[in-house]
Amino acid sequence: MSVGLFGLFIVWVIDGDLKSKIKAFCNNKTALLISSIYLITVLGLIHTSNFEFALDDLRRKLPLFFIPFFVAGFSPVTKKEFHALLHLYILGVLLATFWSLFVYLGGLGESIIDTRELSRFNSHIRFGLEIAFAIFISLYLLFTAKNNKEKLFWLFISAWFISSFVLFSLFSGLVVFAISSFCLLISLNLQAKNVFLKHVSINIFMLLIAGSVYFFKNTLSEFNHCRIEKTIEEIPFTSLKNNYRIDQNSKASTLRENGYLVDKNIADKEFSDAWNNKSTLKYEALDLKGNEIKFTLRRFITSKGLRKDKAAIDSLSATEIEAIENGVSNYKYLELGYFQARIFKILWEYQSYKEGRSINGHSVLMRWEYWKTAIEIITENMFFGVGTGDVQDAFNAQYDISESTLEKKYRLRTHNQFLAYGVSLGSLGILSFLFLLFYPVIKLNYYKNNIYFAFLSIMILSMLTEDMLEVHAGINFFAFFNALFLLKSKDNISHDNI
């Protein structure tokens, strides 16, 4: 990406007439507004103390200024050129998914433990967002196609991208796509003048809502069923006449899997010896996700309602043994679909947290800790924040003050772009960012442009759970398409749906 941006700068210089380009940028109010997102970060230098971090942040965020500056200085992009750019974007995302599929099928001979590792060029979260936007573009091209052959082609591309969410376990991307689709359907319904189109959009919206409610209701029902406390009859000896370890203190452990207590009915030596005879990953080693395999194994066996002994190990299938080695801690995760299992895990993590256990390593729950810490910092630095360069330092200090249970490796920053601006630049920073984000869209009526509306929905939703403008991939994705849409025509025709 850095090379690409440097290439654009070379083109800008070689093309000549630099004075006119700078003048065109300065006379373009929209370009000045959207590039000012970078300038509010520069203002944070006034009261920063960690200039090393600050300058690195400014370097990383430079595309927020440069891309609008670059686009505004050139002639308006024609509709044909704009479509060509959209086609190239889809081609890029398509090639990325094909490469992920190649790796998934064993093309590189790698052992993939977590399918999210199939995002090869950036994080699985941003890969999911890129696919979500590619779907909206593909659907637009589907509905505007001139013949059935083209329509069939774009239908296939859209279906493949949607399948990629499931195949590559892109949970966040699917959630953002689903919510953005709901928002777009509402927007379409409000804009539609044709009664038939209004009815179609309402029916699709209601169908999606009903499907989502049914899915979540079933998942929650299954989870609640698994929470019902169950017991296994406690007996003193295994079939091999070894003692079970029976905890006499009922408060020693409350951890349950599918209702059964994990730390009950364990014949330690028999259980560990049986596992060591079945697996190349030893009982005292780590599973392939980095957790203690003995703990993963105990949870898995407990989830099946079995005692922890040789008989239980002998009952495991080859698929179950491989799953335990890969860090799967409940047999139901093998039966549930990926997304249902993901929700199941989040619910389990929340329940575990309520019972007083650690949140370390649980991405959803750790975000609550990041947001809580960010709000505490903002409260202490209400108006101007801590400065552009002092964000991580402020977080480190606040974690110590609040005696956070997070391990050092998990003590990260906000994972919320709006709070990130609040920490670095205070309430004035948040308000400035919101103004610069939404004012050009409202002023130009660009919320009526359906493709841009989908893009902006994706960005806003991702900013709620990620520091999108703190990482290179997120910065360039936002800066490029935001500038391209808002500055693509000389008159910024808001009702031109591309």
Image (cartoon, grey):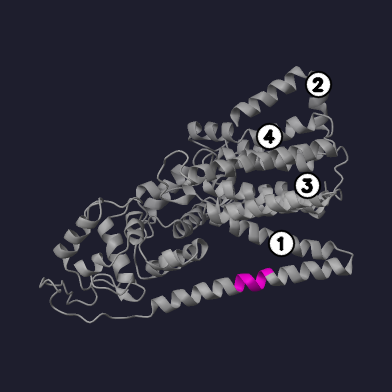
Give the mark nearer the N terminus: 4 vs 1.
4
Amino acid at circle 3: Pro
Q: Earlier in the sequence, mark 3 or mark 2?
A: 2
Q: Quadrant of residue 95?
A: top right
Which residue is under mark 3? 440
Secondary element at image label 2: helix
Does the residue at mark 3 contact the one at mark 2 (Cβ under 8 Å)?
no
Q: Residues within 10 Å of mark 2 (few under 14, many from 20)?
A: few
The residue at 28%/62% (across/down) is 297
- Residue placed under numbered mark 2 in the picture: 19
Image coordinates of residue 86 in percent, x first then y, are 74, 41
Q: CA gap, disc 3 to disc 4?
A: 15 Å
Q: Which residue is mark 4?
A: 65
Local SS, label 1: helix
Q: Main secondary structure of the magenta part?
A: helix
**Picture layout, residue 422 above or below residue 175:** above
In space, the residues marked 4 and 1 are separated at their CA atoms by 29 Å
Give residue 430's mark.
none
- On the image, the x and y values in percent for residue 459 come to 65, 50
Q: CA distance from mark 2 to mark 1?
A: 42 Å
Q: Is residue 147 magenta?
A: no
The dot on residue 183 is 1
Q: Please state which of residues 292 and 307 is positioned toward the viewer in this rendering.
A: 307
Among numbered discs 2 and 1, the one appearing first in the sequence: 2
Contact? badges 3 and 4 (CB < 8 Å): no
Is residue 424 rendered to the left or right of residue 454? left
Amino acid type indicated by mark 1: Cys
